[in-house]
Structures are given as C-alpha cells and as structure tokens.
Image: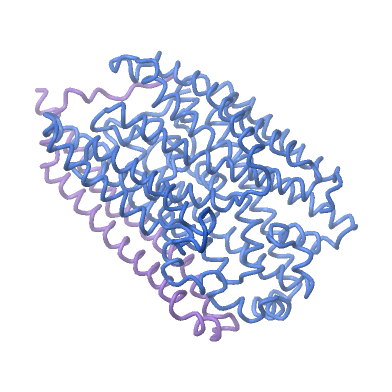
Amino acid sequence: MTTESPTTASRAWSPILALPEFVELRRRRRAVTTALGLIAIAMFAGFLVGFAYFPEFLGHNTAFGIPLSLWVVFSQFAGTWVLVYAYFRLSRTYIQPAADAAVLAIAQRDQEHAS
Amino acid sequence: MTGDADFLAIGICAAVISLTLWVTFAASRRSRSATGFFAAGRSITGWQNGFAIAGEFISAGSFLGTTGLIFYKGVDGAVILCTSVVSFLPVLILLAEKMRNVGKFTLADVLVFRTGARRVRVVVALSTIVTGTFVLLAQLVAAGVLLESVSGIPFGLSVVVAGSLMGIYVFVGGMLATTWVQVIKSSILSILAIVVCLGILAKFGFSVPGMLGAATSNAAAGDAILSPGLIFGQTGAINLISYSLAFALGTAGMAHILIRFFTVPEAATARKSLGWTVALCSVFYLIVIVMGFGTAALLGPDGADRVGAGGNLAAPTLVTELGGGVGTIGGSIALAMVAAVAFASIVAVVAGVVISAAGTFAHDVWPTLTRRKSSDAGTETADAREAKVARYAAVAFSVLAIGLTMAIGDTTNITYFMGMAFMVAGSAHLPSLLLSLGWRRFNSTGAIWGISVGLTSTVVSLMFTEALWLGSGPAPLTIQLPVIITMPLGLAAAVIGSLAGERRHGRSADRDEKFAEMLVRAETGIGAELAEKH
C-alpha cells in the first residue's frame, strides 16, 4: 500500500528560511560542501597536473618499488575514501543535529500557527 | 576463444540467467503499484542500493576493455578508473540526499519541482532517452562481440538474448527486479575479481613490484607503460583534462544512476548507499589495474598476439592462463566464469538503462502525448497508468535497441557511445540539476536552454573529433571527449536562458515560495515521498 506524503500545501515555506535553526542548517551544509569540495578539486587537479606535465618524473621514480605514477592513481582512490568517510562523519555529527533542530523548529512553528 | 561453441560457458551463463529470472518473477508481486514498479517501493536498503549502483556503473567494458587498455597503454589506461571513483564525490556531496528528498520517479521530477512545466519534462526525457540509447548500444554491441569471442554464441543471437532479457526484467519485475539483478551481478563480479587478483599476485609471491617488473619486461611498450603519456601524450594536456572531466562529472548527470536514490526510504540511506558503491567500485577498479599489468606480466612476450588488437580479450586470456591454460579443465572453467560475469554485467547495466528510459517516457512524455490534465498528475490512478505504459515502453525500447544494434553491427567503436553518454550527462543534465537545486532565479526556460544546448553541443562537437570526423584531412578537434567545451556551454545556456525567461515572462508569483519549499524539503526531508508499507 502506498502511504501518502504529509499535506504540505497549506504551509508557508518562505518564513521557514528565516528560522535560525534552518539558517544554521544551511550554514553547516554549505561549510561542509565547500570544504570537502575544495579538497576534492585540489586532489583531482594534482592528479591532472602530475599526469599532464610530469609524466617522466612519475614514470621513472619509485617509492617502495612502485612507480610514482601508480601512487598518484592510488592517491585518487585513497583521497576519495577519506573524503567519503569525512562526509559521512560530518553528516552524522555536524549536519544531522542541525537538521533535527530545524525539523523540530518547523514543527513547533506549525503548531503555533495552528493554535 | 576459438569461435566454436563453448558449452561450459553457455551452461554457466544459463545458470546465471536462470537465477536472475527467478529473482525477477519473485519480485513481480511487489512491483504492481507505481511506486513498486518505478522505485521498488522505496524499500531498498543502503547496501542493496550501493551494490545496485555499482552494478549499474561497472560495465563489461570496465573489466574487459580497461584490462586490455592497461595491458597495451599502461598507467594511462587507469585514468578512466580513478576518475570514475572520484566521480562519486559530486554525487555524494551535492546530489544524493537532495535528489532523494525532492524527487519522485524520474530526473525530470527534480528539474520541474519548482515550475511544473511539461515542456521541461519532455526535453529532459528526450535527453535521458538519448543518453540511454548511447549506453544501450555500447553495451549490446559489447554483449554480442564478447560472447561471440568467449563462448562462441553468434553476435546476433547474443544481442537478441541480452536485449530480450533486459525487456523481461523490467516488464515483469520493474525496479525491484532490476535492483536484484544488479546486486547479483556486483556480488559475482566482486568474488571473481578477488579470486583473479589473488591468483595473479600469488604468481609473483604477492609482490606488486615483482609483477610490474615482469610486465615491463614483456610489454611491447616496455618501461613506458609505467609513465603517463601513451594515450594522452601526443594530444596534449587539454585532452587529458577534458577526458578526465567527462568521466569525473558525467556520473552526476546520469539519469539511470540518479534515479536509484528514489528507491531508498530516506536521505540517510541514499548517503550510506554511496559508501557501499565507492567501496565496491574502488576495490574492483584496483583489481582491474592489477589485472591489466598482470596480463602483461603473465602472458609473456607474445601476449599481444593472444589478446588481439583491441585488447578486449586480455581478461579472458589472463584467467584461462591462471586456470591452467587453453585446453585444461581449470582454464575452461575460468573462461566460462568470465563469460558468465561479462553477460551478467551487460544485462544488469542495460536493464537499469531501460527502466530509466521507459520510466521517463511513461512519466514525463506520455501525459503530454495524451494531453492529460495537469490536475490528474500524481494521483494513484495516473501513477498506475504510467507504470503500465512504462512496462510496454520497456519492451519497445528493448526491441528498438536490438534492431539498432543489429543495424550498426559489431565493427562500431563502442567506447565513443559511452563517452557520448557521459558527455550528455555532464553537459546537459548536471548544470541544470545543480542550478535547479541551488539557484533561486533558475526557471523552465533555463532548463530547456541548458539541456538543449548541452545535448546539441555534445553531438555536434563529437562530429569534429577524430573518431567521428567524416571530412577530409585531420579532424578539427584533437580532444577525444570535448566536455571542456560543452559543459560550460550547457551551464551558460541554463543561466542565460533563466535570465531571458525572467525578462520575457516576468517572475512567477510563487517563485520564492516554491524555491523555499524545495530548499526545506531538500535539507530536511519534510514532504518527501514516503516508502510503501507492506
């Protein structure tokens, strides 16, 4: 059986954007997205610069018997894992509490308007 | 790999197909409602969706084509693998949770959330179907070529079998069956890949430097396979950058990947599912790198003769060697396993694409074609009707795809079809999606301009690349996948279109209210579609 979404048509949405809890939620989301996004861009740019402009250096030098070119490839995998882990952790410990607070504030606001 | 029928390979393929068909018919009971058919009742768990996205994403080309590419071109062949893994970051950070909260069944649901414009739905549907067609053709050609080489089944028959199966999965079991087919494929593929990887490394005492040393000794290009440049060295940095961006950003615009977030119960599960996807894809792609260099290391100096010019037979040749060689029982079983996995990979990918294309046709195009009233949209009756249309559309797409694949034949360069799909996704869908979710002034004119320009510029620009150039002399564009040109064009068109639309039609009365609703829904999940209760 399909469950219906809660009726939301009657709610005024624009004032919710001004709720301090929702402003804080958006601020936290933006901070996490910007920080992790910039790290991802830097990581990816490093890979492109290395492969495009230093191919000889990466191919002829090794660390632990493996050429640096492969270490650069592995770094993209490892960097992605670290960023995914960081996003999961920040979502759970930093964004989710703000989201819960925003949902509560919206519910309280709806109640006040109803009564 | 002789072209004669390999009954062991056919038998193992038949066993895998039987398993997927059993799952499909078992799932059919839960796919009768519209939400059941389009979104698996939003009941898919995090790990299941993660496995399914990986199953959707890892094509046969990933482990057959890329293994051959690394065998011939060395570390440059691994570029597509690491960019593909990185490509999940924009999906995770920018889209997954918001898509789950804002969307319903298709990509267009997110793009028209604020405007409700039917013409946007039609344009998005067209773009989704075009992207899907590129992927379908690439996969079905691959199915035909690979099964013919590995198991001896003729090209045409392989295409008909793969095409028919994808139609059956979607028609009978909808998204739930498609999901489970992908889960089965990912599981078998992961197990096989780990076994092959351990087999390769064991031959060199689990020493990666030892394997790389043997690879450089045997490879035709010698030490050069360890240096970047065998693919991108002659065309310059801009080609490498554009190629990498196409794959790194294209995933975030792929409709058949993004609609998978509508199948989970809430945003947190959408997020978690990507963790599973990244883990699976990363491990698998690392193994493909080992397989590529391992092929060069194990096959000896005559390896190039054994894997063929295209390199697609590198993986089958490698596993046959690991199993004991041609003519041995171990070698035959190993080869048969690869054939089965290749086939499972292809049908899983194409089933996902077909449900995406059929879904968007039924949900976004059909109501316009039949001039259905807007007030009817979203009702249970309308949704059920759309699910019925989608089932038949899936059959029609399957027949069409089989016909087109037969028409273009087995000599077509399939790599370009996949590249085109990623380019359309990155140039047409992604800019409009991001603006839709974050820019207040974005409107239906911007969506139509952005998607149309992204789609058109992709097709036109590819006609000027070396692979598709029909004019005399060298191709004007030396870039393989010119997304570095088409993506900014798609973005600029979306922005300019929005501003032009606002100027022409003025701001709609409820623009700010709809934008606020979308933001609140995207961030908190209030008002998001709920899971079915069973």
Indicate the position of residue A24 as horizontal and vertical percent values: 17, 50
Pick the residue in front: B187 or A48.
A48
Pick the residue in front: B139 or B183.
B139
Residue at the far front in the pictured view: B472
Q: Is residue B376 above or below residue B61?
A: above
- Which of the 4 quarters of the picture holds residue A42? bottom left
Q: Is residue B190 left or right of residue B9?
A: left
Indicate the position of residue B108 as horizontal and vertical percent values: 36, 33
Indicate the position of residue B514 as horizontal and vertical percent values: 19, 32
Please name the residue shown 82% across and 52% down the image. Answer: B333
Q: Is residue B354 left or right of residue B207?
A: left
Q: How is the image coloured?
A: by chain
Please name the residue shown 90% across and 58% down the image. Answer: B328
Q: Colour of chain A?
A: purple
Q: Which chain is blue?
A: B
Q: Is residue B396 left or right of residue B321?
A: left
